[in-house]
Amino acid sequence: MRKRGIRLVAGLMAVTLCYCVAVAALFGADRARTAEGMDEVLYLPNEKLLTHFTGGLNSVIADLLWLNCIQYTAREHHGLRHFTWLEAMLTTSTRLDPYFTDVYRLGAIFLAALRADADASLNLIRTGMLHNPHSWHLPYEAAMVYLMNKREEPDARYLATRYLSMSIATGNAPGGIANLTAKLQDEFSLTEIEQDTWKEMLHSEDEFLRELAQRKLIEIDLRHVCRIMNEALGIFKSSRGRPAASLEELVTAGLLRAIPEDPLGGSFFLGSDGVAYNTTLLDDVVNRTLNPVINALDSYNQQHQAWPPDLETLVRTGFLKEIPKHPYPDQHWEYDPSTGHIQ
């Protein structure tokens, strides 16, 4: 009996040591920078190999990896916002424990809302649905991705309704999901649906998720203000026969009470195209637009051991489908081929 206890303790110590080495390598390498200018380097243990060292404690290791994934996501959210290794970390966690529904659900939100990778988000959700067919959360989150991140696609509403119906079909979804489906079918405002989603997350036990929800709700308000300003700009042009020279002119004309403040520290401005913008919203779009470009630059550098001479090379060599337009009016991407830096 005593020998068995010693073997058990030794086994647990081995598992703990293996995990500590893996996580240390994971985050030590994550912070490493190479002389060639690579953005980030990461060693993430292969989940199939890692399984052999968990001693049957796959779910425990998956829990710990998920906690580290949340920390990594929070750090990136307050840092460069590249989220380069987010998908790999989520994949490792879910393969260690394919029934860990929170990783699929929250990981999909991170991929869609922060990394702006709706396809990766949906792939993660669909994998989760195969292993967890009775979870109403996963098809619900898939519907949210179509409503919030793929809203411009022609079949987005249809697919969202389809996934919501799948959520209801599990028999576990709350009554509000049926109401949401009805809202969608009746062509109610998608903004209202998005607001409800983030408001629900305000009650999360995780501080980072509450912070993210608060920010997203403010962003919704900022978009609403921009719509009001653009409506006022249209009225001004129709009544005066000329476009407004500034947003302040809308206040003078009585079309706006005042130029509101941005709680997130940004500002509103009138673009050269006559459209009202908000810098907080545009800066977020800039970061999300840059992510696939940065990933393409890194992939090119890894394959060719050099940075491309220009961004067009990424398109010609198949690393990027197209060069995205800069979100700010009259601004263009600045790329340095000697460092691979783009802004």
Image: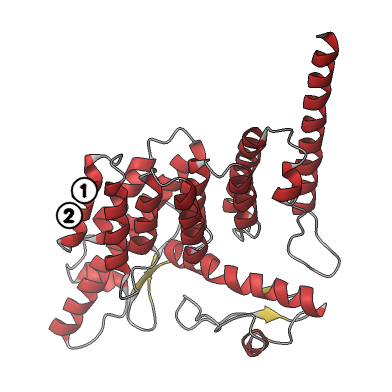
Residue 260 visible in image: no
For the residues labelled 1 and 2, the Cα–Cα distance comes to 6 Å
Task: Identify the coloring.
Answer: secondary structure
Q: Left or right? Give the position of 140 relative to 253.
A: right
Residue visible at 61% across and 53% down? Answer: 91
In this rendering, the answer to whether 53 lies above or below 223 is above
Task: Name the residue beneath numbered marker 2.
Answer: 182
The amino acid marked with disc number 1 is Ala
Q: Left or right? Give the position of 159 relative to 107.
A: left
Counting from the top left corner in percent of width and height, residue 79 is at 62, 54
The amino acid marked with disc number 2 is Ala
Task: Name the residue beneath numbered marker 1.
Answer: 178
Residue 13 visible in image: yes
Q: In this orientation, which residue lies closer to the viewer: 267 or 110?
A: 110
Q: Left or right? Give the position of 170 relative to 50.
A: left
Counting from the top left corner in percent of width and height, residue 202 is at 38, 39
Q: Left or right? Give the position of 276 relative to 297.
A: left
